[in-house]
Image: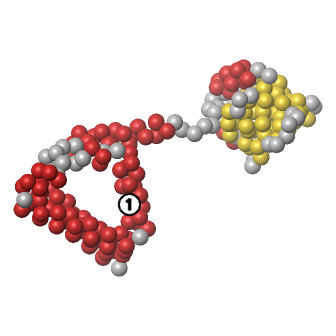
């Protein structure tokens, strides 16, 4: 069990109320003088680190806890199994996305340009999928137009090998463009059927 001198403040207060914070067996309790302010299981509260202590959220209320010995409180808090509340690291969240991009680039990198294997394009794909779910009718029309244009491009580069070598990236062949255009057309038709 650990007891720690602290100052309690509500949001916006400049002066704090002297208090003692007790940590024991996964519970946190606060006493001010001879009065008990509260007793909570650590799982019932949220503690967000501040420069001098923690912002504590419990039962819909928030208070600021400022400690005279913050390091000792943090050590005791860790030993009681409460992890500090914080936003997850952006890089850790995006690691699976980056692995997926690397896998896709390794598999299809010779057929598509480099910009197709970026986080931005993953975001575009997720946005497009969301729009497809929310607005299947208009997306169907867009896919039909894009598919038709892609098939036309495929036909042009199929008949002119010189243009194919200038316009198509890597090992992409005119047949790939035609197949890609046909796939877009089929998806557009299916979405149109679903929308109606």
- Tag 1: Cα neighbours inside 10 Å, few (<14), some, or many (≥20)? few
The x and y percentages for residue 77 are: 68, 27
181 to the left or right of 22: left
Q: In the image, is 192 to the left or to the right of 95?
A: left
Instruction: Give left or right: position of 119 versus 33.
Output: left
Left or right: residue 169 versus residue 68 is left
Across and down, in percent, residue 109 comes to 22, 43
* Of residues 92 and 20, the one drawn nearer to the viewer in this rendering: 92
Residue named by callout 1: 128
Place residue 177 in its image quadrant. bottom left
For image coordinates 85% across by 40% down, the residue present is 13
Instruction: Kindly tell me whether residue 68 is visible in this rendering.
Output: yes
**Quadrant of the image containing the C terminus:** bottom left
Q: Is residue 3 above or below residue 140?
A: above
How many discs appear? 1
Give the camera-side residue of 157 and 190: 157
Location of residue 163 by image quarter: bottom left
Q: Residue at horizontal 64%, vertical 26%?
A: 78
- Quarter of the image for residue 124 reads bottom left
Spot occupied by residue 156 in the image (x, y as percentages of width and height): 12, 63
Quarter of the image that includes the N terminus? top right
Name the residue located 30 percent from the left edge and 76 percent from the top edge. 193
User: Which residue shows up at 71% across the image and 29% down it?
Assistant: 51
Colouring used for the render? secondary structure
Most distant residue in the right direction: 34
Q: Is residue 103 above or below residue 124?
A: above
Q: Is residue 76 visible?
A: no
Residue 146: % across, % down: 26, 66
**Which element is circle 1 on?**
helix
Q: Is 166 located above or below residue 195 in the figure?
A: above
């Amino acid at each position: 069990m650990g007891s720690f001198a602290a100052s309690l403040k509500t949001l916006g207060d400049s002066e704090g109320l002297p208090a003692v914070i007790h940590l024991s067996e996964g519970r946190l309790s606060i006493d001010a003088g001879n009065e008990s302010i509260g007793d909570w299981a650590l799982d019932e509260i949220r503690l967000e680190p501040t420069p001098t202590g923690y912002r504590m959220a419990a039962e819909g209320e928030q208070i600021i806890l400022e400690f005279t010995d913050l390091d000792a409180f943090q050590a005791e808090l860790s030993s009681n199994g409460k992890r500090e509340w914080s936003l997850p690291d952006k890089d850790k969240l995006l690691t699976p996305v980056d692995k997926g991009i690397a896998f896709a680039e390794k598999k299809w990198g010779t057929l598509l340009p480099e910009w197709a294997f970026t986080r931005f394009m993953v975001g575009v794909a997720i946005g497009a999928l969301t729009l497809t779910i929310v607005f299947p009718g208009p997306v169907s029309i867009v896919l039909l137009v894009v598919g038709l244009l892609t098939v036309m491009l495929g036909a042009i580069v199929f008949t002119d090998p010189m243009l194919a070598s200038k316009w198509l990236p890597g090992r992409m062949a005119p047949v790939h463009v035609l197949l890609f255009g046909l796939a877009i057309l089929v998806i557009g038709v299916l979405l149109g059927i679903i929308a109606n």
